[in-house]
Amino acid sequence: MPARTDTLARQESRLAYRLISPTLLIVVVVVVLPVIWTISLAFQDVRLINLRDAGFFGEYVLDNFATVFGSSGFWSSLWTTVVYTVGATLGSIAIGLVAALALRKPFRGRGVLRAAMLLPYVAPVVAVTFVWSVALNPQFGIVNAWGTRFLGWDEPVPFLSQRDYSVGLFGVDVTVPLALLTVIAFEAWRYFPFAFLFIIARLQALPGELDEAAMVDGTSIWQRFRHITLPQLMPVIALLTILRFIFTFNKFDDVYLLTGGGAGTEVVSIRVYEFLTARTDIGAAAAQSLVLAGVLVVFIAVYLRTAAARGETS
Amino acid sequence: MSVDTVATAPSAAPARPPSRRRRPRSREERVWGALRVAAIVVLALVTIVPFVYMLVLSVRPIAEVLLEPGRLWVAPSEVTTDTYREVLTPVDDGGQGFLRYMGNSALVATVTVVVTLVASILGAYAVSRLSFRGRGASGFLFLIVYLFPPILLAIPLFVLFSQLSLRGNLLALAIVYVAQTVPVAIYMLRNYFATIPVSLEEAALIDGCTRLGVIRRISLPLSMPSLIATGLYVFMIAWNEFLFALLFLVERRDNWTVSLGLSRLSGSIEVPTTVLMAGSVVLTLPIIALFFLAERMLVEGLTSGAEKG
């Protein structure tokens, strides 16, 4: 009898391996091996010219890392990436939270609006960045046309092409990183639907008893949100923060399409792309992408721990 | 979760409105109510207006736009479809060739969907139904791949494809997309397969059905909605993708995807903005159409698991 169950189990696992092998093959060939190869490239002096000879084994050197860490450009771009990521993550989650709270209770047209609010997230990135850059254009963009006509702007604001912009705030001139802020605003706009979806799913699954009991006790709406709803949303917000952080930290398309990395918006992924294509310094590009990967690994570890903790408490 | 809403909704619905009407709304409730309405209006404007702007600019003559950049509506008399004609006409006939780019995008996306679905149906079934060593590890690997940023893969794949002279090849691009989408597809399908009663499958196995027969006769027909949602989601990812298209196809204009075509042409001054807006509409419309067709299924597939915990 034991022998028989053993062969059945073995049959089952053999079948499982056969079923999963196509996926595994593609993932290993297109993702796992290339990643290992990147690590190897980061330690070699490879340029596009001597690419033909580049293999897995070469002359391993630390030159790339010395070049990368020694350049001020890398550190300022890493700082830009951090500001961009934190701003975009917090922005998208804040708007998503407001949207989820506003759409929590049913009203006429909620279904349509709920679907429409996902548009920024599902629409092609090239199309939406193009619309934004046209709308923000100083010559023929609608934002500047309205700003100068209705809001009394003295002159059109070059949102995507100016690094520093000074605004008068209570009589004091404050300099703000204009293009970077614009890119952060775009990112918050494009990804708030993602946060909205997760928060509203959780919100609608919350039990109502606590809230009703607190209402009977005469608490204010703000108190109920602050002390009952928000704490129950915190786990999903924490998870979203880490997820958005991971996705935004390495984002390439959005910034590249809006500013091309100019005007103080050069995030590390754009620098990697520049080293890869314009400077054709593959080794240095690989070394920089490894730094990105290092940060990423830390955050994936945090994500896994958070997700695991969430699984245990539920 | 659905059980919960079904159980509470009917009993609460008739009781609430009268009681609410009798009790005068406090000042606090009115303030928050007004803020809520304001938030809804602002959010609706912020999400919808950019798309209206896209549509309006695509049918306005460029001279009008330069003259009056602040107009968000278009008079019926001034509507032009020349922009669409120019953007869709082949390059040889003086247009921008977007019809061809759409064909390329559709080809890449369709191949990606088919390969991803076949691989992920088999993989998801194995992960959700069969026990084998390394089940946890493979799930972990797929999660990592899902979280792994494309820019890190860009370097080795760029080098590899250059060495194999695969750059410019649409099918090679599709394989990269498959690797990016298979993990999500397996995740979405696995959750659905897990809801199918095991007893159904066991009955079929006892009746002499093979495992593959079970997948074909039971799992697939029962999970059709989820399959369609997953397929559409994968299609959208492949259709929208930009970075790898840029890295692999940029030198082969006849193989450009719509996304790549639009981004390349938006840099040049020769093509009028309104023509490119028509290109944006052409790029966006298929995605929005697919999205509204399958919105409910998509949302459920993506957030399943989010409501627990």
Image (tube, rainbow, N blue to C red):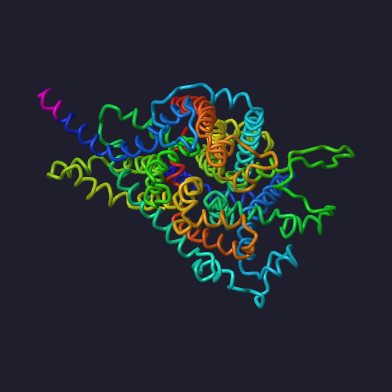
Write the start and end of the magenta stretch as one range: A1-7
- Asked whether the viewer can see residue B172, the reply is yes
Residue B262: percent from left, percent from top: 55, 57
- Asked whether the viewer can see residue B14, the reply is no
Please give the count of numbered marks on the rendered protein: 0
At horizontal 60% and vertical 64% (from top left) the residue drawn is: B55
| On screen, residue A116 above or below B300 | below
Check the image and name the residue furthest to the bottom: B77
Left or right of residue B101, residue B48 in this image: right
Whether residue A6 is in magenta: the answer is yes
Residue A222: percent from left, percent from top: 68, 36
Most foreground residue, B60 or B170: B170
Identify the image quadrant of residue B163: top left
The N terminus of chain B is located in which quarter?
top left
Most foreground residue, A124 or B258: B258
Left or right of residue B37, residue B9 in this image: left
Left or right of residue B178, residue B43 in this image: right
At horizontal 47% and vertical 65% (from top left) the residue drawn is: B99
Predominant secondary structure, magenta span: helix
Most foreground residue, B111 or A149: B111
